[in-house]
Amino acid sequence: MAESHSVEPARWRRAIDLVIDSFTGRFCRVEPRRAAAGFVTGLLADLRIKTCWQLAEQAGHGRPDAMQRLLYRAKWDADAVRDDVRKVVIDRLGDPDGVLVVDETGDLKKGVHTVGVQRQYTGTAGRIENAQVGVFLAYASRHGHTLIDRRVYLPKSWTDDRQRCERAGVPDDVVFATRSELADDMISAAVKALVPARWVAADEAYGNNSRLRSALRKLRLGYVLAVSCDHLVPIDGGKTRCRADRLAADLPATAWTRRSAGDGSKGPRFYDWAWLTDVGADGDPDDDGRHSLLVRRNNTTGEMAFYRCWTPGSATLAQLVRVAGIRWIVEEGFQAGKGQAGLDQHQVRRWTSWHRFTTLAMAALAVLAICAADARTTDRPAPPNMIELTTNEIRRLINVLLIRPTHSIAHRLHWSNWRRRHQARARRAHYARRLNLETQP
């Protein structure tokens, strides 16, 4: 069985149970406890769409009520479950040299009722669209990586309209917070929870924010934060400021060195790097760390990227380059979360439901991250003609070897009939509403 060298269904079963068992104590009643277990398992299942209807059918339920009640009306604390999942992740993937990576992702939406939705820029579409934006925190170490926290971004158009917030179930104490402030909140919570991390990485939307950089220094977390080309970097002890791209343009050829930012799908990601030490101090009176500017240059196109760096102690160029390269793992987390765990398929409108669905999707993603870490540490490494097991492949194999969907013809016909009856009722209700609107004076 050489071809199944790292395929260990029993170990994967234990990983699923480990994640689910970590938070089942948060449910006082057995019904939502079972629904939550079926929900996470269903998110791992081979379903094209992962909404309450499909997850209920996958779990063998006759109706979607239990899954919908889990997201809408059942009594449980999504933040407490998030904490439980985070602890399981850290117990398995934690490392003192860990990196916290913050980024955002958008889900395109129609209408105006989904919590946080408005016309805003989202990298998912690469333009301004009607979208809902979530800010996420990922954890990365030499053992693996996954998402560990989440916040939904509420624009001022929402927080300034308390009636709109009330209709979406937004708590009264929630006020406007920028995306950088949401990032600070998640990072501070991770530090308070003793998540082992030495570094923070983020793109320029966060690196350009001086308040976030100051908050990270107070937490004594080293950072490698991307900044824009026109970002003004303090030089000469903070007496003057200069654009990042101008500083890079004046560098001699001897200032550049070629290093890999880590392995990608096509091999090592080599770039030219320049490191300007002792620049970038923001002027905090209690700042005793070391500031620098890191510049990355694509050796083919010449395109440059810039990073504000700070460490509470000494650091090497190799360390900063490694952290700069790790930032991209959050994109892998979004890709896996959406492609493998249905992170973008929640189809819910309210504040509580969004946090509940997203937390359970992160739990499913944690299962895959732990299984991938276990596969890499197996006593039977992959042979030279095979790559290590990926999260995509692990989920496929979990479906083949562990998940047993209900395939009976009677069950499938029951759900077909239920869907058609429900859709007929919905269509009649929509038609009646439209006719009433058209007949009103």
Image (spheres, rainbow, N blue to C red):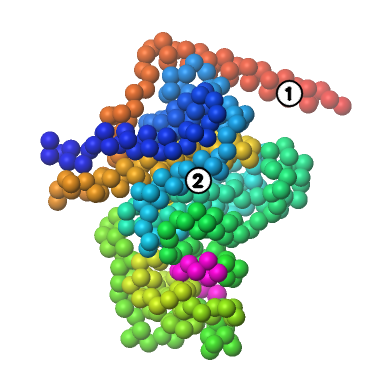
Q: Which SS class for mark 2?
A: helix
Furthest residue toward top: 410
Left/right placement of residue 429 relative to residue 288 reads right
Which is more foreground, mark 2 or mark 1?
A: 2
Q: Amino acid at mark 2?
A: Asp
Q: Quick one: quadrant of the N terminus?
A: top left
Q: Is residue 296 above or below residue 246?
A: above
**Residue position marked by numbered label 2 in the rendering:** 83
Q: Quick one: quadrant of the C terminus?
A: top right
Please tell me which of labels 2 and 1 falls first in the chain.
2
Furthest residue toward left: 2
Q: Nearer the viewer, residue 200 or 432?
A: 200
Number of residues whose C-alpha sits closer than 10 Å to that of mark 2, classed few (under 14), some (14–19) or many (20 or more): some
Q: Is residue 41 above or below residue 320?
A: above
Q: Residue at x 47, y 18 (%)?
A: 61
Q: Quadrant of residue 108?
A: top right
Q: Amino acid at mark 1?
A: Arg
Q: Residue at x 58, y 18 (%)?
A: 422
Number of residues whose C-alpha sits closer than 10 Å to that of mark 1, classed few (under 14), some (14–19) or many (20 or more): few
State if disc 1 and disc 2 touch (CB < 8 Å).
no
Range of magenta residues: 217-231
User: Which label belongs to residue 433?
Assistant: 1
